[in-house]
Image (tube, rainbow, N blue to C red):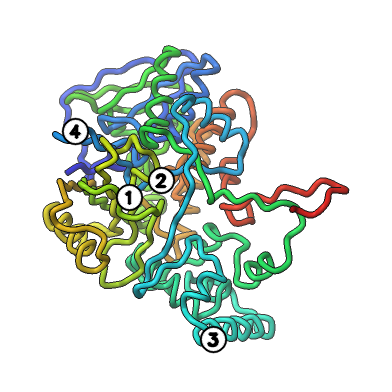
Amino acid sequence: MTDVSRNGHQTNEHGNDAKATTTTGGQAGLTVVMGAGPGGLCSAYVLSQAARPALVLEKAPFVGGLARPIRRQTEYGEFKFDIGGHRWFTKNDELNALFREVIADELLWVNRVSRIYFDGKYVDYPLKISNALKAVGPVVAARAMADYGRTRVAAKARPNPVVSMEDAYIDQFGPTLYRLFFQRSSEKVWGLPCDRMSGDWVSQRSKGMSLVTAVKDAVVPTKGKVVSLIDEFMYPRGGFGRFSERMADGIRERGNEIRLGAGVEKVHREGNRVVAVTVSQDGKTERIEAENFISSIPLTLLARIMDPAPPSKVLEAAEKLTVRNIITVNLLLHKRQVTNDTWLYVHDRNILFGRFHEPKNWSPEMVPGDDYTSLVVEYFCSFGDAIWSMSDEQLVEKTIEHLIQDLGFISRDEVLDGFVIRAPRAYPAYVIGYEKPLETIKAFVDSLENLQIIGRYGTFRYNNTDHSIETGLLAAKNLLGEHHNLDQVNTDKEYHEIKRVPQPVGSGAER
């Protein structure tokens, strides 16, 4: 069993009990990057390319955080896994160029086929309205369209603010489709009723999407070409973790250092500047001074390890923000293929896991041969709940039972082995009321002029991988003389999985 987070912080934080601390003076112009996830590595990679000194500190014994490779050597050969799967897609051409540069000859293009399983039926994911309405049958489809119409009429007559996740989904898709396709999955992911979760998550993940726009785009083509970012995606042959490993190689090749097993225990500040960090490694502590600092460690943890401590209202705010954990059960199978899906989302409430993917469908190099496949099965949970409290053996067995008895995907004799990865603090939870505590912490961090926060956990923002890496890129560019507002990353008002390309003037319709 392995417990990991973006910066390798374990389930329980421990104070620094080392006997002595040494002090290392900072190299002129040194930037300390806290956390070797993809965002932090991107910052150090860009700085290294510009011949700027950078030091990456990572508590875990590996780079990549949640986007690291998992390798399992067996008598049948090597199986490779991602923690939940990380595909590469982005609207940002500069980020695409960076990804291609780093991955180079390991780059694959993968066709995406993702579906939702509910009540014994399969529906395309992301949700395609025509496919969804067909799956539920004409009576339910008619009711869905009718109650969506009533929702829109009522909203125009008496507008109400969208506060909760439930409000947002009903506003976009109507109550029938909300209950069928969004309520079950959302409550499985977050562990709370949708009326207790903020609607911000919905607007961030499905910007501009609604039942009416989906029908309109299907019937009346939108001006300009709509490029889907979901039909295919880029992926490294040996797993997404190769992106982190190859960035790390580039950082070291250019003379900069990545220290693994080096946990940041304290962040020291004087006035409105951070001046040093205290790092614990191999039972010893060291104070490292630097000119600039970039942090991708969890924002709530960053507040707690500041020295001197921030105002009490900041620490109180850190206690109010909550997170959601992921557990993956990784199964090694003597079977050629389970499904042809990239991901399969499982909405049935009697099945505990939320989705799974089959690494072989992403790259044949993820398994030792054609006769083998594997599954990465994801459970969403919180510290101390029933799922988190299950033993690894119980989780593996429960997963096998669901796949055999409920889904009919495998047989017992096809299972070669199984193991568990526990990833705490995987998702920042947008519980209603989270905005004010988050604003309080970020205001304090923003007052420190030489500290930038990046990544999903560093900013407490539910970013995709490309967004997290973009914050790392822009943080490095800020240190190279440019001026970028990292809070503007992932604020595009359009659905994040499509890109509209203006149609050239005078051109004909798409044929």
Query: Marks 2 and 3: in contact by CB < 8 Å?
Result: no
Give me the disc on residue 73: 4
Residues at marks 3 and 1, CA–CA distance in whole angstroms: 39 Å
Alpha-carbon neighbours of circle 3 within 10 Å: few (<14), some, or many (≥20)? some
Q: Position of residue 397 (x, y in %)?
A: 14, 58
Alpha-carbon neighbours of circle 2 within 10 Å: few (<14), some, or many (≥20)? many
Q: Amino acid at mark 1?
A: Arg
Q: Disc 2 marks which residue?
A: 457
Say whether residue 9 is left or right of residue 300.
Answer: left
Nearer-N-terminus badge (3/2): 3
Query: Marks 2 and 1: in contact by CB < 8 Å?
Result: yes
Alpha-carbon neighbours of circle 1 within 10 Å: few (<14), some, or many (≥20)? many
Nearer-N-terminus badge (3/4): 4
- Does 412 appear above or below 82? below
Q: Residue at x 52, y 25 (%)?
A: 101
Q: Residue at x 75, y 53 (%)?
A: 510
Q: Position of residue 4 (x, y in %)?
A: 27, 42
Q: Residue at x 55, y 78 (%)?
A: 174
Q: Position of residue 36 (x, y in %)?
A: 37, 31
Q: Amino acid at mark 3?
A: Arg
